[in-house]
Image (tube, rainbow, N blue to C red):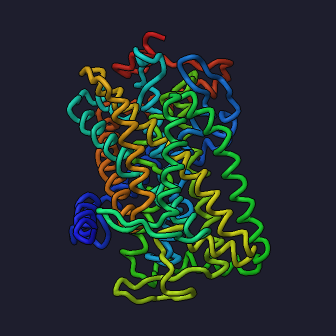
Amino acid sequence: METFENFVNAINNIVWGDWGLTVFPVLVILCLLAGLFYTIQTRFVQVRMFSEMIHLLKSNKSSAQGISSFQALAVSLSGRVGTGNIAGVATAIGIGGPGAIFWMWLVAILGAATAYIEATLGQIYKETDVETGEYRGGPAFYIEHAMGKKWYAWIFAIATIIACGLLLPTVQSNAIGGAIVQTLGDGSNIVTSMGTFASIKVITGSVLIILLGFIIFGGVKRIASFAQVVVPFMALAYILTALVIIALNLNQLPSIIAMIFGDAFTPMAGLGAAIGIGVKRGVYSNEAGQGTAPHAAAAAEVDHPAQQGLVQSFSIYIDTLFVCTATAFMILITGTYNVIDGNGGFLIQNIAAGISHEGPAFTQMAIESVMPNVGNPFIAISLFFFSFTTLLAYYYIAESNVAYIRRSFTLPGAMMILKIAIISAVFFGTVIEAKIVWALGDIGLGIMAWVNIIGILIIFFMGRPAMRALKDYEAQKAAGVEKYTFDPKKLGIKNAHFWENK
């Protein structure tokens, strides 16, 4: 297992560009610069049109082919709001110190502009699946049609199938298993040829794959219906719990905020650690630039592509500025965290050395310290819903890319193979160690982000389709139209076949 872990870590460093050329990985720099670039180009669309985002959330328009704008938001949020919001924040603090939270905030604010761009592109270049009749779209589709490079689209599709079908699901299921163990204990040991595993994790993994199988065999409509009920409820319950803890310790909040900002630029863990892990976990949580959200955005039934771009931009605020901040404040206010120094020691040690920062333990202890006998089960339940809905989103994203490839080749049984693969990955992730699955997840996130961010930058300079859509939408809004329309040919946007034929 140690050899496998070393191999995974080596691949992770290569994927993220941790080549010793800069203080922090090259991909971290790319994520920040891309967000800054689109923020400037869109004239801070994530701030200027905040009220319009709220207005668009009220739309319940759907059809036999597409889900509503709110359902698409719920599906994308089910991918964004997951383990990263609970365990990922704890990991960021444990490695990068309190200042890492500032960099999570920054990548969220900048990433909201990136989210607008990629989600709008997903809408512009969506298609109707000839087999299911449902809308399909995402980076593979807009790379092919906007860039005209099918080979590059295939790279993204294959990378996404591997990432969302095999690598990223392991992180979500592992967090659920870890939270259950923190609540109920390990149980007895089960010895196998692959190692010794805790029986409670094996049982948890078995339950997870049964439930997952039931949902994913129902298609995108069942996923959307499940997500639109569960996601708002779980996020609200979690934030309310955090607000109670913050309110009980309100006098500490100013000093906690000051500590986050102070440690952001003179970090105890070093600038590379704070920014590197802050951006990594920020992107892992909000997924801006990763290329996952455009799949759900493309499935929405809207009058204008920019509408779903704005809705997806708003989801970044919910994910990072609301849910991740709630987790960070709970951990920092209660002091239930350690900060490691990278050499086996601690820069800060508030709790027992044996408690891992690579999991939900910090968050569970934070709630437990204020609400005895509540924290462990509450986080276990929250993580189950957060992570389970993320698993559904991952399956849908992987399925969309299989559907993309299947347009060119007949792949009998491809969807069944995908279902078996993700179910196997979920069980594997539940029972193995957390530090391995986080590295696997980072590899999946990294390969998608590289391909997608480079792709949307090239598309921007080739034709600026998402910017043209934004300008057109703002013009119609200023004119006070009753019903928005989108004519790609009039705007000089090529190959937007769905909208051309609508």
Of residues 487 and 323, the one nearer the viewer is 323
Instruction: Note whether residue 83 is visible.
Output: yes
Of residues 494 and 204, the one nearer the viewer is 204
Instruction: Note whether residue 474 is visible.
Output: no
Residue 209 drawn at (x, y percent): 48, 45
Decide if residue 374 is on the left or right side of residue 152: right
Residue 417 drawn at (x, y percent): 33, 34
**From the viewer's perspective, is residue 204 above or below residue 359?**
above
Residue lying furthest top: 501
Instruction: Name the residue: 65% across, 69% down.
Output: 376
Instruction: Name the residue: 48% across, 74% down.
Output: 357
**From the viewer's perspective, is residue 394 above or below residue 400?**
below
Of residues 158 and 257, the one nearer the viewer is 158
Instruction: Name the residue: 28% across, 62% down.
Output: 12
Decide if residue 378 is on the left or right side of residue 196: right
Residue 164 drawn at (x, y percent): 38, 45
**From the viewer's perspective, is residue 287 above or below residue 310?**
below
